[in-house]
Image (cartoon, rainbow, N blue to C red):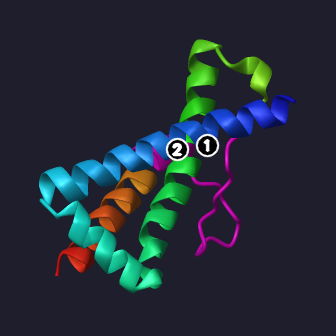
Amino acid sequence: MKTLRRLGLVSLCAVVSAAATLGLVWFAILKLDPGLLAQKMNLDRALYIFPAIVLAEFYCFMNDLLVHLSRKHRALRNLGLSEIRFTYDLDVRNSVIPLRSKLLGLYPITIALLSFGAGAILGS
């Protein structure tokens, strides 16, 4: 039951964050027409990969953010959250990427590039 609650909490946070971010970037900043966007995505099903990857990135981001908050504020300890482990590919020692680097650099940059890149592709 604890695993189901943990997955539900992280998934809910990820879905809400991904929808809000994509909506903000695509409709408010890039001013894409929702009807035209839906039509383009329905014509080419491969375009659904962008929101799926953004959702996966937000899932990892929200999980690691909740881990950070639970460590810092001693809340959500009973859910058993654990950090998603990513390592440097070019490092022989298989070093883990620090949580702070992932939260402040890796996830936001990847999400921004994917959101704006998909918006540019869909807007053309």
Where, quadrant-wise, is the N terminus in this rendering? top right
- Which residue: 67% across, 49% down? 84
- Mark 2, residue position: 14
Of 39 and 22, the residue lying toward us: 39
Where's residue 35, x and y in %? Answer: 24, 66
- Mark 1, residue position: 11
What's the distance in space between the residues labelled 1 and 2, CA to CA? 5 Å
| Farthest residue, direction right | 1
Q: Inspect the image, locate mark 1, and give the three-letter code of the amino acid beneath it.
A: Ser
- Which residue: 57% across, 19% down? 72
- Give the left or right position of residue 25, taking residue 110 as reference: left
Q: Would you say residue 84 sits in the magenta stretch?
A: yes
Where's residue 21, x and y in %? Answer: 33, 48
- Which residue: 46% across, 40% down? 16
Where, quadrant-wise, is the C terminus in this rendering? bottom left
Where's residue 29, x and y in %? Answer: 14, 54
Of 57 and 97, the residue lying toward us: 57
